[in-house]
Image (tube, helix red, strand yellow):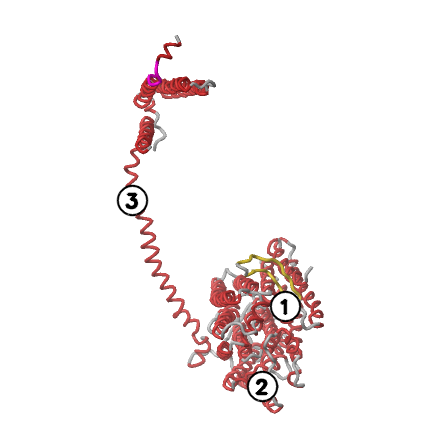
Amino acid sequence: MNPIALILLFPLLGFALNGTIGHKLPKGIAPWIGTLFIFLPFVITLGQWDILSNDVEATIKWDAYTFFNLDGIIFKAAFTLDRLSIWMTLIITGIGTLIHLYSISYMDHDPNAAKFFSFLNFFVFNMLLLVLGANFLMLFFGWEGVGLCSYLLIGFWYQNASYGKAARKAFIMNRIGDLGLLLGMFLIIKNYGSLEYSDVLPAIAQGTGGSVLLTSIAILLFIGAMGKSAQIPLFTWLPDAMAGPTPVSALIHAATMVTAGIYLVIRCEALYALAPIANEFILWIGLATALIGALIGLRQNDIKKVLAYSTVSQLGFMFVALGVGAYTTALFHVTTHAFFKALLFLGAGSVIHGVHDRQDITQMGGLKKMMPLTYITFLIGTLAISGFPLLSGFFSKDEILASVFHHNIVAYIVLVIAALLTATYMFRLLFLTFHGEFRGTDYALKDVHESNWKMTTPLVVLAVLSILGGVLNLPHYLLHTDGFLASWLRPTFLIFENPAHTDITTEIILIGVAISIFLFGFIYSRSRYITKNMSPEQSTAGIEKVLSNKFYIDEFYQKAIVRPIEFLGDILFALVDTLLLYGLTFSVHPILRFIGRFNRKIQNGNIEYYLLYMVGAIALLLGLNLLFA
Amino acid sequence: MLTIFHSLEISHYIYLSTVLFSIGLFGVLFRRNAIILLMCIELMLNAVNLLLAAFTEYMGDVQANGQMFVFFIMVVAAAEAAVGLAIIVMVYRNTRKTDVSFLDQLKD
């Protein structure tokens, strides 16, 4: 059996099993089925690594099914495992397995655990469909499936009305982006007559299609990526997405879903390399997202919200890298970010679990004594994301900063500020949660407990990965050769060349800037929250109020978009529905009644009359026949 | 005896059967007694029978296909009369009447 088929089969099987008979199985079986069926694809994928690494041209293909052939345009379910998709598959299934393992304990008390795991498996299945697809059609299938699963999982505790709203918000905002993706695909079909990557991308690379066309396609596809990867202006769903159980947040923010947009752009490298205007657009959207996400993260008091805005900000970093054409760097940051963001979210989940489902950091503090393992791993995650030297985030983020530095100095400065804010808000979160005095009022410190091994094992594994993740693309700095990831991905690119290396002085300066960014963030937060022992800000005035209210973006959308649409809906309801449709239906029936008043007399129940009508009709027909014969 | 029939022209048969059919039709339309209705229906059927027999003879059809039909119609008419009379008997038992204008219970 084709390995790709196996990789896709197991999560789907897990979904079907848990979704149908999961709740009837003895307690505790369903979660393990879910976890195992994500782990198996990971092992299978790992088994394919050698095939791809031995031969740079090698890809594993699977033509599963042809849907239909429309005027020579073939729509089929085809899959390919190349160097890019195997990398993504390993992240998805690897991190996915850890998150599943963690969820076993996290969802222990939930009566719907089987349903939860079936959704998780389906989520991973759709994400695999997305990255393994050999054409835009399969990408779109996975794209929509991921959107559906995020809706199901964010609204998993749908009894809470606001969680249901968050789920709908995520779905609708994603739909807006999907429209862009769909339009981009239409343009591709119209101009290239195919949806297969292997047809479209080489054609683009060989110069088919004018720059206007390429730019339009690139921007339309990027609008799709904006929705899925939470870029301005479609990012507000992601912070709300933490309404779901914490492992879902980890899955959405780290392994699946938000990386889809990055994957799409890297996959369409040939297209983006030839559309400089689109690149510039991506760069500035990414920059704005990175900065605004980081600013908002500075004054959030919900442990998961801080992390959510941090994801928004980090995704901005990745798009900045894509915008300057540093595709391997973006994927490198996707990878390291998957490690440390999964770690941070799972750590946050452990904290939330430990303090009995509370998320407000104003009610925390001093937890490090009670939850030592969670503290240490969370600390590592914080160090990694803030860019502590030699940890994974340091390398990936500095690669982004370096490539932006060579591209545009203004963008570089903005990005440095965003990185600085990242370190600041992350240490603020760490200090307020784990250090200082315990501030909880409605529960006692002694009730706080460390989580069990099923929750801490993934934390430890992810912490190790967060420390060592940098080696994946290391030599770029030290040896002035391509990093491992860069050379690994090179064969999959059609146009892209790894950027030229700069002289050693510039690099040392850049590294110096990066380290001082980290130090500044650390020292600033330390002085505020440890030395001065400040409690979390209530943020009632000035810029702080604006930040804690997330720049009022949600309110703005509510007023500028949702309200007018609702208003339009009200008008249409009053005019079209009430007046026109109701008016029509209610005016039809008196007319019929009126006609019926006369017609009814014909059918009076006397058989003689009926016979008379019959004879009369026959006579009429005969008469007509005689007349016209 | 047969010569009498042969001396009649086809138009005479047509006139006779038209008259018979019309009597039957008007009886069906304007009488209310169920038994008379049945009789009138028989009259109409027999008018048709007469016409069939006459035309068979007129066309010189040696296989007498038309006259075969007459027998079919007579059989069906007999069956119909039996069923019809049975219905009338049942109606009479329930209503003590054989007046069909009374049978308008299905309306409304």
Identify residue for label 2: A514
Bounds of the magenta segment: B8-12
As drawn, A122 above or below A391: above
Q: Is residue B62 magenta?
A: no
| Position of residue A603 measured from the top left corner of the image (x, y, whole percent) | 32, 32
User: Could you tell me the amino acid type at mark 2?
Assistant: Ala
- Judging from the image, mark 1 belongs to the subunit labelled A
Secondary structure beneath dot 3 equals helix
Query: Of discs 2 and 3, which sits in the foreground?
Result: 3
Q: Are marks 3 and 1 in contact (CB under 8 Å)?
A: no
Residue B82 visible at all: no
User: Could you tell me the amino acid type at mark 3?
Assistant: Ile
Marks 3 and 1 on same chain: yes
The Cα atoms of the two marked residues, 2 and 3, are separated by 81 Å
What is the number of callouts on the image? Answer: 3
The Cα atoms of the two marked residues, 3 and 1, are separated by 66 Å
**Which residue is found at the position 43% from the left and 81% from the top?**
A543
Residue at the far bottom in the pictured view:
A505
Q: Is residue B10 magenta?
A: yes
| Position of residue A45 measured from the top left corner of the image (x, y, whole percent) | 68, 67
- Judging from the image, mark 2 belongs to the subunit labelled A
Identify residue for label 3: A591
Which numbered marker is on residue A89?
A: 1
Crowd rating for badge 2 (residues with CA inside 10 Å; few <14, some 14–19, many 20+): many
